[in-house]
Amino acid sequence: MFNNLKSELDSIIERDPAAKSRLEVFLLYPSFKAVRAYRRAHKHFIKGHFFRARAISQRALRKTGIEIHPGATIGKNFFIDHGSGVVIGETAEIGDNCTIYQGVTLGGTGKETGKRHPTLGNNVMVGAGARVLGPFKVGDNSKIAANAVVLSEVPPNCTAVGVPARIVKRDGIRIGDLDQIHFPDPVSQEMCGLKRELDKILEEMEK
């Protein structure tokens, strides 16, 4: 247990240049407290003590602003940088040495049952404000850009950006041009979708 604790503290110091000591991380980092609370809650969850597990996780949420469902599966050396507003769903799976930033959601779309949340491989980084939604995998060593909305699988060693997210780099090689102007407009896409639904309703009413 002590070795695991030391490993997690050291991994945070390696990834956060603002961290000055293990003691600072242990006592003052809300993300570290949230992850430690998750690990306690998860032990209760797998034993079937669901109410106790949820009580621990909800207490951690009130104290840190980070919501990790006790049913999630999280590997070693997991680091949430800053952390406020992070949500990790019940069936999410996170590999070793992953880093996520504030405002990230590892959630479902509301359409699935059973496995509803994403799986992150090892050494995955998810940028601030990103949404990864659905029961698919983000491969090892991949990166999700800030504010991206990921709705489908991301292969290993890739970088995904945009709304909806698209792969712009794979194995260190850029895929196409990084066009900073012609990203899909999510508002326009949503309006088009609503118009299609309205057209369908009108057609049904005319029959």
Image: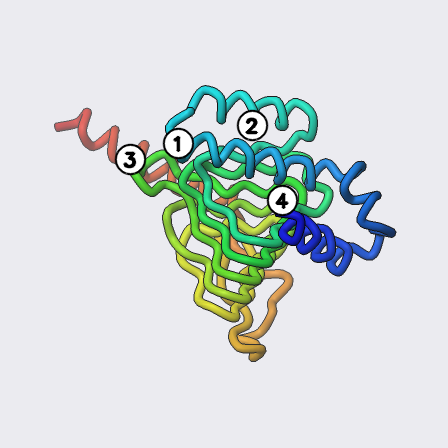
Q: Kindly identify the residue that appears in the image at 56 percent across and 51 percent down.
A: 148
**Badge 4, how many Cα within 10 Å: few under 14, some, many 20+?**
some
Q: Could you tell me which secondary element the residue under label 3 belongs to?
A: helix
**Badge 1, how many Cα within 10 Å: few under 14, some, many 20+?**
few
**Left or right: 200 in relation to 170:** left
Circle on res. 47: 1
Residue on which the image places disc 3: 199
Residue on which the image places disc 2: 57
The relative height of residue 179 versus residue 33 in the rendered view (above or below) is below
Dividing the picture into quarters, in which one does residue 178 lie? bottom right
- Circle count: 4
**Nearest-to-viewer mark from 1 and 4:** 1
**Badge 2, how many Cα within 10 Å: few under 14, some, many 20+?**
many
Residue on which the image places disc 4: 129
**Mark 1: amino acid:** Lys
Viewer-closest of 137 and 61: 61
Question: Disc 1 versus disc 3: distance between alpha carbons?
Answer: 51 Å
Q: Give yes or no for contact between labels 1 and 4 (Cβ–Cβ under 8 Å).
A: no
